[in-house]
Image (tube, helix red, strand yellow):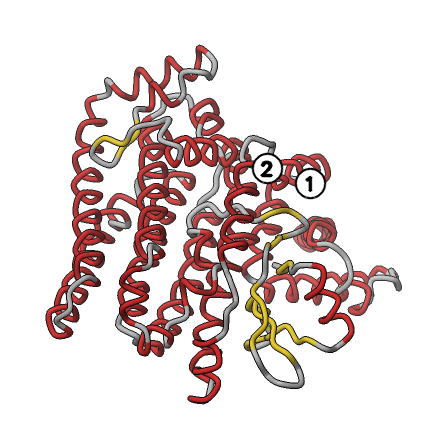
Amino acid sequence: MLFEFISTIKAGIDSGQYLEILSNGIPIGIVRDTTSGSFLAYAVGAIASNHPLLPLTVPIQFLIPGVNMVQDYIAFPQSYQQSSSLQTVLKSLQTNISVLQATIALIELGKIPSVALEAVNLRQTLKLKKEVEEMQLELKNGFIDLQKALKAQGAEVRQIVKEVVHDINFEQHCTVLGRAYSLFMQACNRLQSAMESPDISQRKSEIDSAREMFLEVLADYINPQILEKVSAPGQLRRFECAWAIEQAIVITYQVQNQVAFVSDRLCHLRDKIKEHICTVINNCETYDELNFLFPEISRVCKHDLPILEVWQARVDWLRSLSPVEIKLLAKNNCNDSELADTLVTNQTKIVLSVPPEQLVYEDLAEKSHFYSLLDQMIFMFKPVLRQEYEVYINQQAQAAGHKILIPKNLQQVSDMTVANLYYYFKVRDESNIEETLEAITA
């Protein structure tokens, strides 16, 4: 992910007059003067893979510096209480969960998987989120009306939605997740009320209680007994709801200024997301599931995870500041509203277009087979697997006399090339083994 700055600030960065601040090697969207050390500007935009950011499960507001300037709250608790940042972020999390959980029913109960998955794929889900945000779709007990939401789609989709809504298991599904969402909303309201309390002790107690409620909600979305019975896409959507709840839990630590816990929980969440996704990939069984998973998992990798990474990097940076630097940061007159406006505007522009991840996947699918595509997804989250494949390819290439496939060259090629080469040599290697065994036993 790259941050964008206004032209005068960018020129200053290019000339060395200004410095874009890094934390653990990660840009955090803040610029300071290299001579005076004063904080000059916030980013006005952010892009991922040359496209505007549009995450699926993470509120884009987390990129706005004022939202995660934890230590600033010590000196200015009143300004934080008056801020709408917390309410905006929680509202975004509520929207994300409501849309994602509404699609779970169609994924898990739809009788024609290919049609059901296409109806709620990445592109359609982003559109549904936007419609909820613009109040074109109404939420009822934490759900959107699927029949109304998908009425513009084909007759086959409308028929499947109708069947799902009248399925005997649909009511039970809605009851369980509806109860969980209701508890999530109660926790959000409790957290917001706590922030308005002038009593420090009561505020702490209420925030702790809200956190416990969030933790309780998690159990309904990632119940192991349910997860083992649903398909890979169903697992992914349940995990995505859980990640949103985990972000709310992190917020409870942030508003208490427990910066060490914030950093630790964010690191844990990022690792958990990668672990969950690898589980989903390993459970993928069909091309219909793969068509659904690849673009969505790519979006999480390139948009959601980088935002969490920046959030953690900012918190770690704040922890490293001296008291003097904290005062400088608190006194600076940087305005982050321009970044907020840009991010929202970009979301509106790109939500209706075909996601670039979908176009990339379609291109890869023409050149790779099923298992190669699965591995290409895993490479996004487990670089060590790619390294193991490179070693294997090099060994097999050496034995076959292919001198060009040396480690240095393999490190520079695409994930698709590595995965395809691996299976090329794997099939060849296994064929040789079979021929040898046949010769021995003949």
| Viewer-nearest residue: 191 or 121 | 191
The disc labelled 1 sits on which kind of residue? Leu
Position in image of residue 280 (x %, y %): 44, 48
| Viewer-nearest residue: 290 or 441 | 290
User: Could you tell me if residue 294 is visible in this image?
Assistant: no
Q: Which residue is mark 2?
A: 355
Position in image of residue 197 (x %, y %): 15, 65
Q: Using the image, determine if residue 255 lies above or below residue 111.
A: below
Q: Label 1: few (<14), some or many (≥20) within 10 Å?
A: some
Q: Quadrant of residue 68?
A: bottom left
| Viewer-nearest residue: 159 or 375 | 159
First in sequence: mark 1 or mark 2? 2
Taking the image as shown, residue 102 lies to the left or right of residue 425, namely: left
Circle 2: element type: loop
Taking the image as shown, residue 23 lies to the left or right of residue 145, namely: right
Count of all numbered marks drawn on residues in the image: 2
The disc labelled 2 sits on which kind of residue? Pro
Residue located at (71% from left, 34% from top): 366
Q: Quadrant of residue 202?
A: bottom left
Q: Using the image, determine if residue 440 lies above or below residue 157.
A: below
Q: Which residue is mark 1?
A: 364
Taking the image as shown, residue 334 lies to the left or right of residue 172, namely: right
